[in-house]
Image (cartoon, grey):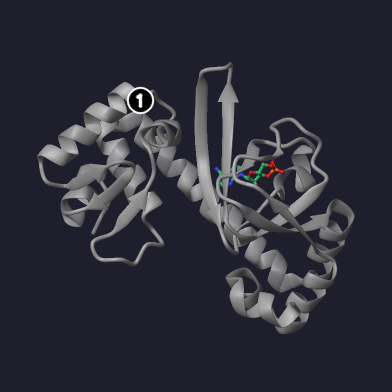
Amino acid sequence: MVERALRQVPFFSGLTPAEARKMLSISAVRRYPAGQLIFAKEDIGDNFFVVKSGRVKIFTSVGPEKKKTFAYLKKGDLFGEMSLLGGKVRSASALAADDSELFVISKKNFRRFILENPDFTLKLLHTLADRLNKANKEIESMLFHNILGRLAGAIIELSKDKHSAPVKVTIDQNELAQYLGTTRVPVCRAINTLKRSGVIDYRRGELMILNGARLRSIAGVAD
Ligand code: CMP
């Protein structure tokens, strides 16, 4: 189990072998079927998680209608650290977007681990810095870009780890609207504009990037 996790989950290969082994020895594995809530915003934070397989959606909701997806996390991504480090309660909700397996570490073990394992702590800081950077870009995009630019930026973000040619992203219009923190109608209009100009194709929840350079230019992202 230890060797397989070290080989298969990129998160562990970024640690020293000794740290990875130590971390696995204090982890339990939990399985969540697609659609199951892992924890809700405002819950007391009690565990830290690393995605072993599947996909986890991090989101917030305001009232019954307004939802905003912050991120989709995949194999090797970590979450649940913020409430254990400071905030006490969960800053967002987490839900299994696909059938998922998670490594789970208790708050007590997590806090001890960050004090004793500097490579892990550096990796954690890296992740926090990346997320802050992404959040800053999103604030910029919300303030200064129209829906078309924001959709283009979201497509680029969602396709980051895809290596097929042409690049394909599986996501339905509701999920895209939640990712942008808006409703389906403006997203549908923006998709049609990108389709008409030959930048993307989108059919039955499958989005294909046809002109990456034009998409980056619409998103205001440097090549
Ligand atoms: P915590 O606040 O304990 O619970 C919710 C978790 O979602 C949080 O820790 C982070 O791990 C994660 N999270 C919060 N905001 C973001 C974001 N913008 N991008 C990715 N992950 C996030």
Instruction: Report x, y in % for residue 145.
Output: 29, 33
Q: Residue at x 34, y 67 (%)?
A: 163
Residue depicted at 64% across the width and 66% down the height:
123
Question: Does residue 216 appear in this view?
Answer: yes
Identify the amino acid type marked 1. Arg
**Which residue is situated farthest in the left direction here?**
197
Residue 140 picture quarter:
top left
Say whether residue 152 is left or right of residue 85.
Answer: left
As drawn, is 202 to the left or to the right of 96?
left
Q: Residue at x 79, y 63 (%)?
A: 114
Which residue lies most toward the right here?
Answer: 108
Q: Residue 39: horizontal and vertical position, in percent?
A: 72, 38
Q: Which residue is mark 1?
A: 184
User: Does residue 194 lie above or below 108 as drawn?
Assistant: above
222 up-or-down from 140: above or below? below
> Within 10 Å of the Cα at label 1, are there few (<14), some (14-19), or many (20+) other Cα atoms?
some
In the image, 120 versus 169, the foreground residue is 169
Q: Is residue 209 above or below residue 153?
A: below
Q: Secondary structure at mark 1?
A: helix
Is residue 146 visible in the rendered structure shown here?
Answer: no
Asked whether, in this view, residue 148 is left or right of residue 82, the answer is: left
